[in-house]
Image: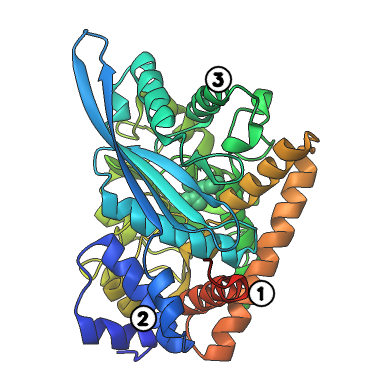
Amino acid sequence: MATSPAAKITKAKGPAATFWDRARQQFHATADLINLDESCREVLGNCRRVVQVSLPIKRDNGVIHTFTGFRAQHSNHRGPYKGGIRYHPDVTREEVMALSMLMTWKCAVVNVPFGGGKGGVICDPHNMSLGELERLTRRYAKELIPIIGPETDIPAPDVNTNAQVMAWIHDTYAMEVGRSALGVVTGKPVSLGGSPGREDATGRGCFYICLKALPLFKMKVAGSKLVVQGFGNVGYPMAKLWQEAGGKVLAVSSDKGGVYNSKGLDVEAAAAHYRQIGNLLAFKGGDQMTNAELLALKCDVLCPAALEGTITAENAGNVKARVIIEAANGPTTPEADLILEANGIFIIPDILANAGGVTVSYFEWVQGLTNFFWKRAEVYSKLQEIMVAAFDDVYDMGRKLKVPMRQGAVALAVSRVADAFKMRGLWP
Ligand code: GLU
């Protein structure tokens, strides 16, 4: 078994219970690694602010139902808080706190001038009408007005939210403050100040990272086999780009299960089915399989693109991929990390792999503030430039500290945030 810093801290403190525990454990392991001073540890090991809101909404049947929402703001040392909003039945306060910490590190890894935030509402958007979703979103936005804004905290899409949800947040904010404020959210529709290329940016960023990383193992995308867990905003564009570049997409899945074809799936046909039905059950282009079977498929690259904590101590030993690219936030538990590391699997960590989304959010924010809009090709080439530079920075940091990419990425991020914290000093 490896004795990386993560291994030491896992042994010392036992397995982390929640996602927030895991995020903090990862931070403290990194703090040990880079000898971070105590004051930085205390500040960066916690969220600066976590807000909980009650959201009474009239359902279509006339009954009022009160939902619960959160917004966690981890750090704004390098710029405004930044991060998505998710709608999911399993959202918790601790989950959004963990995700806001990861956003701080992610923005620092790609060196965009943001801190970290994250929001979520406990709801099942698949069982809500468009009208109910609009009322919920507007009420949530109204509750967040005191703490969001183009220079304070800038939400974006995340699990089960999209450009329409961002348009409602933008409209609610603009109506309430009485002025246009394109910079208050990113991931808006292009017709409303959104950036071309934002929708597929996270998946595209993962793809650019693969183009850069695979040659390290004498591999290339063309002819290589990809397995994708999760087929939403991130998994679908990643699979599509992979296939367009001559790679084979062996399997994709939703929360209900996956579909596998040893000759390679028709990604567009699977996407059309998914858009229509909301899952991949009964898709005829391959054989049905469970998510557990999918994670155990022999492939070149495995791309977990669903929720956190899907690769665990129980299933990590089954993974047969050469490379894992973490499109989701926090898909691998620290215990699973050690198993994968011991089995020689190269992991490209979430805060690097999926940073394409927030990078194009940054481009969108800049375009909104300057009212000058870019062409898609410009967005893609600037995205690729930033992803490649971030990969090099993380890789170099990992080599310098003699640790895997994950610790290298967190070490790079924490050092950048700690520098900003120290330079700013305290007030009052
Ligand atoms: N929700 C995305 C993420 O986890 C994007 C955040 C953003 O664009 O602010 O990175």
* Residue assigned mark 3: 175
Q: Amino acid at mark 3?
A: Met
* Mark seen at residue 392: 1
How was the colour assigned to the protein in this rendering? rainbow
Question: Callout 1: 10 Å neighbours few (<14), some, many (20+)?
Answer: some
Tell me which corner region of the image, top left, top right, bottom left or bottom right, holds residue 189.
top right
As helix, strand or loop, the secondary structure at mark 3 comes to: helix
Mark 2 nearby-residue class (10 Å; few <14, some 14–19, many ≥20): some
Q: Are marks 3 and 1 in contact (CB under 8 Å)?
A: no
Q: Is residue 344 visible?
A: no
Q: Which residue is mark 2?
A: 343
**Front position in the image: 381 or 106:** 106
Q: Position of residue 260 (x, y in %)?
A: 37, 47
Q: Nearer the viewer, residue 353 or 87?
A: 87
Q: Residues within 10 Å of mark 3 (few under 14, many from 20)?
A: few
Q: Amino acid at mark 1?
A: Asp
Q: Where does residue 108 sit, x and y in percent of width and height?
A: 58, 65
| Amino acid at pointer 2 | Asn
Q: CA distance from mark 2 to mark 3?
A: 55 Å
Q: Is residue 156 left or right of residue 98?
A: right
Along the polypeptide, which appears first: circle 1 or circle 2? Answer: 2
Q: Is residue 15 above or below residue 324?
A: below
Q: Is residue 56 above or below residue 31?
A: above
Q: Residue at x 28, y 55 (%)?
A: 94
152 lies left or right of 42 = right
Q: Quadrant of residue 313?
A: bottom left
In this orientation, which residue lies closer to the viewer: 413 or 336?
Answer: 413
- The reply to whether residue 236 is visible in this rendering is yes
- Between 183 and 59, the one lying in front of the other is 183
> Rounded to the nearest whole Å, what is the CA distance between mark 3 and mark 1?
43 Å
